[in-house]
Amino acid sequence: MTIKICHICLDENEYSETDTLKKCCNAFICNICWSKLQNNDSINNCPICKKILSEIINENETEITIDEMFMFSSIYELIIKLIKLINLLIKLTAVIVCIIFIIIIIFLVI
Ligand SMILES: [Zn+2]
Ligand SMILES: [Zn+2]
């Protein structure tokens, strides 16, 4: 934990590296000011390094989507396995029904 002075509101804040929302440059902006910047439609880039805010946000989002994709792929694999299992069950019941039909037909013939 280090005390940093926000470049926008000039408040002294105690933040650890991982707690700060702003990732683009080393200049410190507190989380409150940073979220205000992101919600402000007239400001499109970081006031310090001029990096485009939407790009910074997108970088964070892609990290999440990779995680989500990984999660979805494991769910997808599970569903495929389930479908294969159900397929197998259907084939098995179809075979059993066929056998029952044959037995019934044989009985009817006799
Ligand atoms: Zn601030
Ligand atoms: Zn910056």
Image: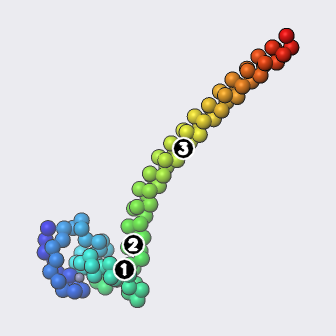
Comparing marks 2 and 3, which lies closer to the viewer? 3
Q: In this figure, which residue is indicated by the disc labeled 1?
A: 38
Q: In this figure, which residue is indicated by the disc labeled 3?
A: 79
* Structural distance between the alpha carbons of marks 1 and 3: 38 Å
Judge whether 70 appears above or below 12 on screen: above
Count of marks, rendered view:
3
Task: Where is residue 50? Give x, y as percent.
Answer: 34, 83
Would you say the residues marked 1 and 3 are in contact, meaning their CB atoms lie under 8 Å apart? no
Ligand 1 picture quarter: bottom left
Residue type marked 3? Ile
Would you say the residues marked 1 and 2 are in contact, meaning their CB atoms lie under 8 Å apart? yes
Q: In this figure, which residue is indicated by the disc labeled 2?
A: 57
Q: Residues within 10 Å of mark 1 (few under 14, many from 20)?
A: some
Residue at the (69%, 23%) spot, across then down? 96
Residue type marked 1? Gln
Q: Residues within 10 Å of mark 2 (few under 14, many from 20)?
A: some
Q: Is residue 27 visible?
A: no
Task: Where is residue 92? Give x, y as percent.
Answer: 65, 27
| Tag shown at residue 95 | none
Given the current orientation, which residue lies at the most extreme top position? 110
